[in-house]
Amino acid sequence: MIPMEQRTLGRTGRDVSVVGQGTWQLGGDWGEVAEDDAFGVLDAAVESGVTFFDTADVYGDGRSEQLIGRYLKNRPDADVFVATKMGRRADQVPENYVLDNFRTWNDRSRANLGTDTLDLVQLHCPPSSVYSSDAVYDALDTLVAEQRIAAYAVSVETCAEALAAIARPGVASVQIILNPFRLKPLDEVLPAAAAAGVGIIARVPLASGLLSGKYTKDTVFGPEDHRTYNRHGEAFDQGETFSGIDYATGVAAAAEFAGLAPEGATPAQTALRWIIQQPGVTSVIPGARSVEQTRANAAAAALPPLPQSTLDAVRELYDRSIRAEVHGRW
């Protein structure tokens, strides 16, 4: 196994790799991934030094959790911290975020992952009012006391939701969209999290693949791929697909971003390296559908820090091409 830099994941007190493995694509919404290919991705991640898997009970209606559980059962030597999420399988109303439902959702995830105590459970982008509910955090504290979960956290859509959660003493980490096309969390969220000792998990790091530089305006995605059916937020929050950017705008900006990649690095690795070196970030969780993608993502952790000139160029590109479209919305 290749060593990788480890950082403490906020109030969990556990160390995780700076590049983790996102597993949404192993469950669904990115096209079909065969079981053997899914295990190949997980194995390549572990062999590349990844010690952090992120999943959710809604990914493939539990398929992603089940695959991770079966993989780790067969790899007892793999020291992997698994974060899952709960809430999106139910109607998105605040009234559903109660202790009885939490226990039911928790039981299902524990069975899927084959463990008595989950490392970390994140509220999965619930209605905004949930982040400010005392009763919700009391219920999460109860799950910890019952040893169903070791720690709890949140996954958010907006900076305001992140700040509300960071103020709660039991929240271990915040998962938020952060990439060179989504800079708003740098302004307040990352500094507030660092001051409070809360971890930051950066998701959608490649803007649904845009930042890989591989797509053109003529690229066609399959009908079962969220990059086809959720471009305008038809199925879930628009920000989860291409970071909420108009596809044509994103393709043009991604072509410019590709020109910022240093020699020997791909545009995708450059985007991951950019995220890793933002102060306050604990781990970035790119997805992958192949062994090659997995290894390339992990290799971004070994790249030297990007120079200030590149950081300035990213900011200029964002301000010129992206900011007006997404900054106010999220």
Image (spheres, rainbow, N blue to C red):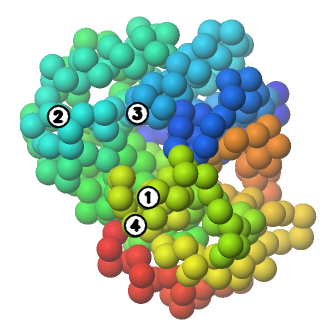
State the image coordinates of residue 251 (x, y, percent, origin top left).
64, 76
Which residue is depicted at the point 43% across and 41% down?
10
- Mark 2, residue position: 97
The front one of 110 and 28 is: 28
Mark 4 is surrounded, within 10 Å at the Cα level, by few (under 14), some (14 to 19) or many (20 or more) other residues, namely some
Q: Is residue 32 left or right of 2 when viewed as pictured?
A: left
- Whichever of callouts 3 and 2 sits on the residue coming sooner in the sequence is 3
Label ID, residue 230: 1
Q: Quadrant of the N terminus?
A: top right
Frontmost of labels 4 and 2 is 4
Secondary structure under the numbered disc 4 in the rendered image: loop
State the image coordinates of residue 202 (x, y, percent, origin top left).
51, 53
Gap between marks 3 and 2 measured at Cα: 16 Å
Residue 311 at least partly seen: no
Residue 47 sits in quarter: top right
Gap between marks 1 and 4 measured at Cα: 5 Å
Which residue is depicted at the point 15% across and 43% down?
93
Residue 250 at least partly seen: yes
Q: Is residue 243 left or right of 71 when viewed as pictured?
A: left
- Whichever of callouts 1 and 2 sits on the residue coming sooner in the sequence is 2
Amino acid type, residue under disc 4 in the picture: His
- Whichever of callouts 4 and 2 sits on the residue coming sooner in the sequence is 2
- Mark 4, residue position: 232
Amino acid type, residue under disc 2 in the picture: Tyr
Mark 1 is surrounded, within 10 Å at the Cα level, by few (under 14), some (14 to 19) or many (20 or more) other residues, namely some
User: CB atoms at circles 3 and 4 under 8 Å apart?
Assistant: no
The front one of 167 and 48 is: 48
Which residue is depicted at the point 80% across and 57% down?
303
Amino acid type, residue under disc 3 in the picture: Val
- Mark 3, residue position: 58
106 w.r.t. 277: above or below: above
